[in-house]
Image (tube, helix red, strand yellow):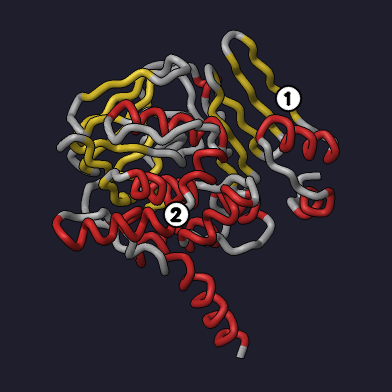
Amino acid sequence: MVGAALANRTLRNWAPAFAGERWGGCTGLGTGVTGQRRAATARRMFDLDAYLARIALPARVTTDAAGLGRLQLAHRLAIPFEDLDVMLGRGIRIDSEGVFAKLVTARRGGYCFEHNRLFRDALAALGFEARPLLARVWLGVAADAAVPPLTHTLTLVTVEGEAWIADAGFGGSYSPPMRLIDGEEVVAPDGARFRLVRDDAHDWMLLRDGDPELTDGRATGDGFQRQFSFTTGRVEPIDLALSNHWTSTAPGTRFTTLAIVSIALPNGFASLTGRDYRRKSGENVQMAEITDPRVYRLRLSMMFGIDLSADEVAALGLF
């Protein structure tokens, strides 16, 4: 009976996680009449004005590279990365309705599967063609370690006939959109350099060369370091559902053992991993261990815009 109940609960949690993935915001709008119909449906279903207000953009962006970059940066400046609902034992929904209710209406943050779902829905509503990709995170992984699982999602966007990658949900640092070209380099607002290269074993690899203090603490040393690898193969809704489920429930993994929060700043980055707070903005650097739950709750609200009750903070098990 217990096994059956668990299976039923799992199915209920998974069903909304990919129920809306058929819409173009996640699987790609396609071309021709079918693609046009999906695009029109996505625009009708998504409250673009509310999303733009959430990310403090006064008007719609243009459907070009500049518009894509502007939208992604505004998203990451406004909506924090966080896994607190995982730590609180709550299911993580990645359907359009659930993600919008949490990240926009309730003004919470989320992790990559939530952020990039919302971002793809916004792209579709604006008229971009986009679809999801899955990635393996190498940041902080030793060179001789086992291959990491597919615990990250990003977005492949077609802009003026060219393929670009965009990522509104990587919690370790901020990387701008990039053309999908071997050797492509971009510079982030915080000065970090990102390079995209072909990889014999993992197809594509994103590298970062920048100040480790402008990350969530996993970056060390100088020079280009691996961030994540990905392929451009088609990702189905069930693939996202499985990766989201494993990422949010597997025992002993990063998101089921650590309370993680981060946000991009106009010229820096801030993170809160467990009780360790890090913030660098320009030349100003702050690092501290938070030992008082009241200070932790205040920091969540003032720095990251996340409002939890005192009981919710206590349930995180940090103090």
- Indicate which label's residue lies in the foreground, 2 or 1: 2
**Residue toward you, 257 or 177:** 177
- Residue 21, given in percent of the width and then of the height, sits at 36, 62
Give me the residue at 28% from left, 47% from top.
130
- Residue 111, given in percent of the width and then of the height, sits at 52, 47
**Relative side of 271 to 7, left or right:** right
**Residue toward you, 138 or 75:** 75
Name the residue tied to disc 1. Answer: 288
Q: Is residue 152 visible?
A: no
**Residue toward you, 82 or 51:** 51
Residue 296 in which image quadrant: top right
**Relative side of 181 to 103, left or right:** left
Residue furthest to the bottom? 1
Real-space CA distance between mark 2 and mark 1, rounded to the nearest whole angstrom: 40 Å
Q: Secondary structure at mark 2?
A: loop
Give me the residue at 21% from left, 53% from top.
233
Q: Is residue 303 visible?
A: yes
Disc 1 packing (10 Å; few <14; some 14–19; many ≥20): few
Q: Is 5 situated above or below 102?
A: below
Give me the residue at 56% from left, 24% from top.
265
Q: Is 268 situated above or below 51?
A: above
Q: Secondary structure at mark 1?
A: strand
Q: Earlier in the sequence, mark 2 or mark 1?
A: 2
Give me the residue at 31% from left, 57% from top.
40
Q: Mark number for residue 46?
A: 2
Q: Amino acid at mark 1?
A: Ala
